[in-house]
Image (spheres, rainbow, N blue to C red):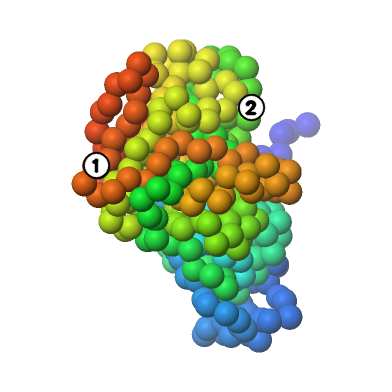
């Protein structure tokens, strides 16, 4: 029998704008008790209480991800996760998202369905409702831009650190950079590779931890580690007008990072200081916080590690290294307009 040619996969151009919007609306959480008007009107109408948090972040193909390293569902997950991490860093609860898409006309609809499957998965996990957005064609790369609204009772930002506070971080650092290296080099096999690659593909925002920290008077300032531990500590120090010491030997490295770094011919601490995209919480706290760390770990299932101290401005900003060495604390993380490797740059 003659072979029947496969029907071409429908593209977003073939589906059309309004049918595409309706298709996407059905794929994500789109209604809730505080949504007065959702997708389908000129604007969404929602109810919020307390202080409103607003953030946005764009993921651009070839800059933040490539489809050979991430599945469509991974891309959708990451697009919302990076915004959730911003809300976590302010001690807030996420509520409503708006999604804007720049779509090449030839993109298969099935790819976009996959992106929205990942987006719906993480939105459901963190009780986020998608209430609107926009779609547009582009002759450039695919991009997904997320705006996220949240609310908080106490705003815990980058300013507020005081000399004498400890510098702390949740979880581990450098794992996303290690995971990206392993994704780019599938021939390399190291222990815990799956966990490291997942840290890059599907970062876990620390929403519950951020809320718990915001509820503790001893915690004075906070930021997420999107740009790298060193850069983000400097951002916090700049906002607070203080000095800082970072203890290199205290950096919490995830299992498998040392092996991945050896395979890459790198020092694992370079990834820990400047890899970025870990989306952990870096925060400062007074001495009273020390007594809460065990309870925090047990309750929320995440470790917290003291990695340094906040100093007086005149004491400078530096790294205490091995053997008593002391080097300046300088930004080594990702910069969109200086770095060109893409996807976080490690």
Where does label 2 land, which residue? 194
In the image, 344 versus 9, the foreground residue is: 344
In the image, 180 versus 63, the foreground residue is: 180
Q: Quadrant of residue 124?
A: bottom right
Give the answer, above or below, for where 308 lies relative to 183: below
Q: Position of residue 195 (x, y in %)?
A: 63, 30
Q: Is residue 267 visible?
A: yes
Where does label 1 land, which residue? 316
**SS assignment at label 1:** loop
Crowding near pointer 2: few (<14 within 10 Å), some, many (20+)? some
**Residue at horizontal 46 percent and vertical 58 percent from the top:** 220
**Alpha carbon distance from label 2 to label 1:** 39 Å
Q: Nearer the viewer, mark 2 or mark 1?
A: 1
Q: Position of residue 165 (x, y in %)?
A: 43, 49
**Residue at horizontal 53 percent and vertical 27 percent from the top:** 253
Give the answer, above or below, for where 187 lies relative to 192: above
**Residue at horizontal 40 percent and vertical 31 percent from the top:** 247
Q: Relative to 161, is 241 on the left or the right?
A: left
Image quadrant where one finds the C terminus: top left
Q: Relative to 200, is 29 on the left or the right?
A: right
């Amino acid at each position: 029998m003659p072979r029947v040619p496969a029907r071409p996969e429908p593209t977003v151009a073939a589906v059309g704008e309004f049918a595409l919007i309706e298709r996407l609306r059905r794929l994500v959480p789109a209604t809730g008790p505080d949504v007065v008007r959702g997708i389908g009107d000129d604007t969404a109408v929602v109810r919020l209480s307390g202080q409103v948090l607003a953030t946005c972040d764009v993921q651009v193909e070839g800059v933040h991800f490539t489809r050979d390293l991430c599945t469509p569902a991974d891309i959708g997950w990451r697009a919302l996760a990076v915004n959730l991490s911003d809300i976590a860093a302010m001690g807030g609860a996420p509520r409503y998202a708006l999604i804007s898409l720049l779509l090449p006309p030839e993109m298969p609809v099935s790819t976009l369905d996959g992106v929205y499957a990942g987006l719906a998965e993480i939105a459901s996990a963190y009780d986020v409702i998608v209430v609107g957005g926009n779609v547009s064609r582009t002759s450039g790369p695919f991009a997904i831009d997320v705006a996220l609204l949240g609310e908080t009772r106490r705003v815990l930002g980058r300013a507020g650190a005081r000399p004498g506070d400890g510098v702390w971080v949740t979880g581990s650092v450098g794992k996303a950079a290690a995971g990206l290296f392993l994704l780019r080099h599938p021939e390399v096999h190291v222990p815990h590779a799956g966990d490291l690659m997942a840290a890059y593909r599907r970062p876990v925002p620390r929403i519950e931890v951020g809320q718990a920290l915001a509820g503790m008077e001893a915690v004075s300032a906070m930021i997420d580690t999107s740009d790298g531990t060193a850069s983000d500590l400097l951002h916090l120090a700049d906002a607070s007008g203080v000095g800082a010491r970072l203890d290199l030997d205290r950096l919490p490295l995830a299992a498998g990072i040392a092996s991945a770094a050896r395979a890459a011919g790198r020092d694992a601490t370079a990834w820990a200081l400047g890899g970025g995209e870990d989306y952990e919480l870096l925060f400062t706290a007074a001495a009273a916080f020390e007594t809460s760390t065990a309870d925090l770990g047990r309750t929320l299932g995440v470790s917290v590690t003291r990695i340094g101290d906040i100093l007086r401005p005149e004491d400078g900003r530096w790294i205490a290294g091995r053997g008593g060495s002391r080097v300046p604390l300088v930004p080594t993380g990702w910069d969109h307009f200086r770095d060109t490797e893409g996807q976080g740059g490690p």
